[in-house]
Amino acid sequence: MEKVEKSYHDYVIKDGKFIGKFDDMYLDVNDPWMQSSQPNKYSRMAGILHLKNNNIKSVLECGCGLGYYADWIFKETGIVPKSVDISVAAIEKAKILFPKLDFEVSDITKELEKFKNYECVMLSEIIWYILPSLNDVFEMLKTHFKGKYLIVNQVFYKGSQKYGVEYFTNLEEFINYVPFTLIGKCEATAINESTIETSTIFKI
């Protein structure tokens, strides 16, 4: 009998509730979020442009998953990101897929300080997953990364958001929530998509 692969949504956010079983997801689902093809490239390309436009030379990529975006960043900029993810399974797979890059298991909501030598912190599509700790992350950034950069690549939803609505529901609300100085933003979508891709860069 052919095995039916589960949807990654079942492990992340379902019916407006946060599940957060990332390790199980990476063990059970081969390519969550279609990372290998990265079908909606707007925010990812904008994140790379933020790095180039601000002459950033080192970046901590938080939420690297299987490592495909880290590889893209390297190919476009020459930067080998320090790429971290909370999932042990994701990091193990990323190290196999991209052995020349730099991957590490880390929970940035608890240990962001250990990466304070990096010039830029990139939150790569993880805002919805760290919402309860987001203000703590901002405080760590204020304390240990003052004068450096924060890049946030994040998807928003066209009227279908159920989770996190008490925080923000669109890009402008998110920008107003962040306690740092906005220096660049990008917002784009395809007409047939239910999501809006965004990328912002702030000076901490």
Image (cartoon, rainbow, N blue to C red):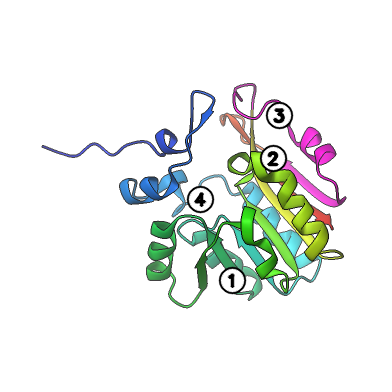
Residue range (magenta): 158-187
**Marker disc for residue 38:** 4
Q: The disc labelled 1 sits on which kind of residue? A: Phe
| Number of other residues with Cα within 10 Å of mark 4, as a class: few under 14, some 14 to 19, many 20 or more | few
| Mark pair 3, 4: CA separation | 23 Å
Q: Is residue 81 left or right of residue 65?
A: right
Q: Quadrant of residue 135?
A: top right
| Mark pair 4, 1: CA separation | 16 Å
Instruction: From the image, tell me which residue sits under label 3.
Output: 169
Instruction: From the image, tell me which residue sits under label 1.
Output: 74
| Mark pair 2, 1: CA separation | 23 Å
The location of residue 167, given as percent across then percent down, is 73, 31
Q: The disc labelled 3 sits on which kind of residue? A: Thr
| Quadrant location of the C terminus in the rendered image | bottom right
| Mark pair 3, 2: CA separation | 15 Å
Residue 126's place in the image compared with 172, above or below, is: below
The location of residue 155, given as percent across then percent down, is 63, 39
